[in-house]
Amino acid sequence: MKILVPTPLRQYAGKQSAVDVPAGTVGEALNALTSAYPDLRRHLYSDEGKLRAFVNVYLNDDDVRYLQNEQTPVKDGDTLSIIPSIAGGR
Amino acid sequence: MTVETETPVTLSNDEILRYSRHLIMPEVGMEGQLKLKQARVLCIGAGGLGSPLTLYLAAAGVGTLGIVDFDVVDYTNLQRQIVHGTSDVGRKKLDSAADTLQEINPNVKIEKIESRLTSANALELFRDYDIIADGTDNFPTRYLVNDACVLTGKPNVYGSIFRFEGQASVFATEEGPCYRCLYPEPPPPGLVPSCAEGGVLGILPGLVGVIQATETIKLILGSGEPLIGRLLLVDAMGMRFRELKLRKNPECPVCGPNRTVTKLIDYEQFCGIRGQEEAAPVAASDISVEEYKQRRDRGDDLFLLDVREPHEFSICNLGGYLIPLNDLPKRVNELDSSREIVVHCKLGGRSAKAADFLRKAGFTKVHNLAGGINAWAERIDPKVPKY
């Protein structure tokens, strides 16, 4: 499946905007991503290993918090988006 | 949205001519144009997003535009803040914006609020308006605007930008989610760069600010499908627009049924205190640009390490050895720990982190150049451009 990496996090993902990973669940996909790019881990997970509250993960156009979180099953052709908060305006 | 007044609001013949292209379409018409004239919109910030937002709302005939800002126009604003011009540099943004907007449409009443939006003034301010449009630049104010909108029951027309990506939505309506439903907590300080640190493509606030203006006008007219419960993502480089579903979070501390936030809080504290990039506080191991120049001129052996990005290096440099901050851990072996090292960046923040990293890695003679290359340009060599 495809994971879309947002601009602020691309510097920790080899400057890539999208990464293909094999995965059966959202958790496995994120694990595959952070294994390939370890610098991303601290941006996505807290020290306790929980997905950070300011990082939103969407499977296609749905927030995984309203699906089955990291246990949500995924299939080929799905797109996972990481939507970090940004605050710029001036 | 409509305000009951004693004397019925009407349009003058001049106004009818001016708004002709609105009046002849049934989606606006006379009724809609009168709604616009009676509407009171508060724009937070007269900067990147605030520029297109206020320009279009004024042109469209929104009757009263409140603008909250306390900043002064500078040269770095002009690449995107199109409500201000070159001759406005040094003026208050409020004065500059008000002049431009009155020139576009003298029928609009501009209310200038020269103040920082705070927990002490937000509620009182918001109560006087129908709609709040958020064009601020930092997390504390984002959360403050959201919470004040929820508490006063005013819709929050949200837009936010970073480099070439933007987000827009309408939060805090009665039926829809609020900003905290989407982002319950802010990122820790330092993790997400601001426009001042990360840069922004000049047209991006144009795209996103015009979306905010569109949503504001639709809310006033009460027509169309506003971005309630939807987050619009704008990618200017790919020129792709995507939409994500947002839900009202039943656990939301501000708008949920078991809300715990019932008044405004200290948002600086909530966000870990961080506005824009500022020069790091001076530490004992810092070296001033004057001292660095003096020591370099007398021939001391100092190794200058530049931890900015390569594209910044090409704007201007002091002949330092370039290793961007993020690459430092894997390239630290390129440095000689027996030499005295002076680290610099643009303003001194990143180089302080680099100096700290090097000390932990066993380097004992490391100084941070206080104020960075901008301080050098300002106080030592005016031929070096500031950016």
Image: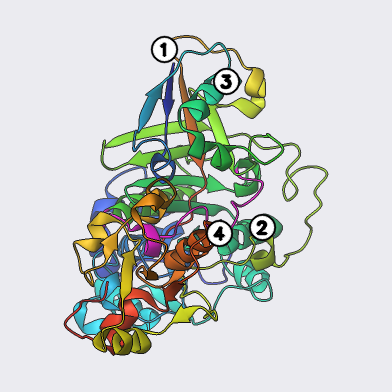
**Which is nearer the eye, B304 or B57?**
B304
Considering the image in quadrants, where does the N terminus of chain B appear?
A: bottom right
Chain identity of mark 4: B
Say which residue appears at 72% left-offset and 65% top-offset: B264
Question: Magenta region: which residues?
Answer: B183-203
Kindly report which numbered mark, 3 or 2, lies closer to the viewer in this rendering: 3
Q: Is residue B56 above or below residue B116?
A: above
Tags 4 and 2 touching, CB below 8 Å: no
Q: What residue is shown with label 2?
A: B147
Tags 3 and 4 touching, CB below 8 Å: no
| Residue B386 among magenta residues | no
Kindly report which numbered mark, 3 or 1, lies closer to the viewer in this rendering: 3
Main SS class of the magenta portion in the image: loop
Kindly report which numbered mark, 4 or 2, lies closer to the viewer in this rendering: 4
Same chain for mark 3 and mark 2? The answer is no
Q: What residue is shown with label 3?
A: A26
Q: Residues within 10 Å of mark 4 (few under 14, many from 20)?
A: few
Q: Secondary structure at mark 4?
A: helix
Q: What residue is shown with label 1?
A: A77
Same chain for mark 1 and mark 2? The answer is no
| Residue B214 visible in rendering | no
The picture places residue B131, in percent across and down from the top left corner, at 53, 59
- What is the CA distance from the residue labelled 3 to the residue labelled 2? 31 Å
Three-letter amino acid code at the position of disc 3: Val
Three-letter amino acid code at the position of disc 4: Lys
Q: What residue is shown with label 4?
A: B360
Three-letter amino acid code at the position of disc 1: Gly
**Which is nearer the eye, B23 or B75?**
B75
